[in-house]
Structure formats: C-alpha cells, structure tokens
Image: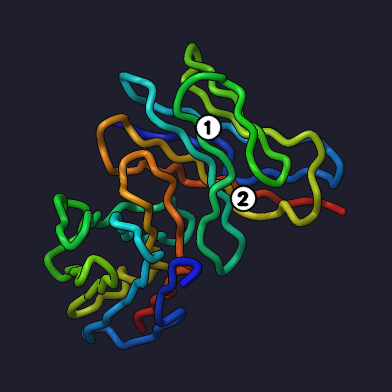
Amino acid sequence: AQSVTQPDIHITVSEGASLELRCNYSYGATPYLFWYVQSPGQGLQLLLKYFSGDTLVQGIKGFEAEFKRSQSSFNLRKPSVHWSDAAEYFCAALPSGTYKYIFGTGTRLKVLA
Amino acid sequence: GAGVSQSPSNKVTEKGKDVELRCDPISGHTALYWYRQSLGQGLEFLIYFQGNSAPDKSGLPSDRFSAERTGGSVSTLTIQRTQQEDSAVYLCASSLYGGNQPQHFGDGTRLSIL
C-alpha cells in the first residue's frame, strides 16, 4: 500500500543546532512531495515542495529538503533551529495523476533554549 | 477572504447529536479537501471536491458522514448521530485546481463528543 513514514514521533534539539526530520515514501513512481508545518491550534502551512528537477529544494523559514530516489526519502533540514520552529511537521506525498494526498503521522519538534 | 476559513473553531456536543462543519475556501480555488486529524495521528483524507462534484467519497469513515459543496465555494461536512470516536480536528484545505497544486489549510474545527 502507498504510504509515507516519518520514523521520529518526537525530536528535541537545542536552539541554534541543526535539524533533520526524516520522511520515507512507498510508491512505485516518484510522487510529488511536500513538507508542512502545523503550530498548535492552527492549520498546516506549506514549507516546500518537490515535483522534479533539482533534488535539493529550498523553502520558507530557512528550511530545505533533499529528495533521494535511491532511498525513497525526502528529509527536511535546517542549519540552525530557532525557538519559533517548535511545531509539528508533516511530510506528504501525492502520487502523480491522483488527487489523494498521503500524509505521514508527523514529527513533533521541541526546541530547548 | 485571504485564507481558508472554517467554522466553528470549536464544537462540543453530546453523543447522538448531528453536527455541521463549514469550510469557506480561498476565492477561485476549485479543489477542496476535508481531512480528519485525531490525537497522535496524521491526517486522514475524507473527501475531495472538484467544483461541486466529489469524485471519491470512499474516505468517509461511515454513512453517518456526508459532505456537500455549493456554488463551487462553501462546503459543509455533516456528521449524523455523533459517536465519541468522531472526536477529532477536522481540517479543510483548498487548492487552485487540484492536482499537484499545494493545498492551503484552514485552522480546523475541534470537535469534542461528550
């Protein structure tokens, strides 16, 4: 079955440290890939997306993600985390030619001062 | 409006009652999606509208759930005879024409069934 896996339920990092959130997808062909962030009590905000081409994509708020076909991964990174980055992060995939987004279960990020 | 608007933001109701959740998408967005987010879970796809049509209703959890969209704009998700397991945050999203267009989310309706 098609799926998106975020292996880390919770991650804690210190402010200023680097961050990597993992995402793996399970599809025959490369789907469209997205990262969203959700702050408490709010909806999801798009951070970045990958459709094709350059495998390193830049997003808002200083985030980037790298698509690796060989690993079926689309990991989210940030060089230096700010306290305001504390939130829940969702990876999502959209198989080409479909409309049904598949979301991972999310990774909750905690940032220590 | 500027973004996707959902109402009410919170709803508390007794088991067995019917509830209606409303979503007002971004103006001009033809695609509209409903999701359910339960505690500790990801987003569960419920239904997708393209215009007023819902090509696939298979994500709706049971026949107590229904949704409609009128005028290619506002959508209503109705849950009849609510059960405690219906407690969740219901999120609505819209996109310009569907497909791979990024989805814009509302802040959700937090539904609590007593």
The residue tagged 1 is A23
Q: How many marks?
A: 2
Say whether residue A75 is left or right of residue B38: right
Q: Nearer the viewer, residue A109 or B75?
A: B75
| Marker disc for residue A1 | none
Neighbour class for label 2 at 10 Å: few (<14), some, many (≥20)? Answer: many
Q: Secondary structure at mark 2?
A: strand
Instruction: Give the residue pinned by disc 2.
Output: A108
Query: Which chain does the numbered disc 2 sit on?
Result: A
Say which amino acid is labelled 2. Answer: Arg
Q: Amino acid at mark 1?
A: Cys
Q: What x and y, as percent, mark residue B12?
A: 39, 85
Graded by Cα atoms within 10 Å as few (under 14), some (14 to 19) or many (20 or more), the crowding at tag 1 reads many
Evaluate whether label 1 is on the same chain as label 2: yes
Above or below residue A30? Residue B102 is below
Numbered disc 1: secondary structure:
loop
Q: Is residue B7 left or right of residue B70?
A: right
| Relative to B2, A65 lies left or right | right
Gap in Å between the C-alphas at discs 1 and 2? Answer: 13 Å
**Front position in the image: B74 or B58:** B74
Sequence-earlier tag: 1 or 2? 1
- In the rendered structure, the answer to whether residue B99 lies left or right of residue B55 reads right
Q: Quadrant of the N terminus of chain A?
A: top left
Which quarter of the figure has residue A66? top right
What residue appears at the point 37 percent right and 63 percent down from the top-left corner? B92
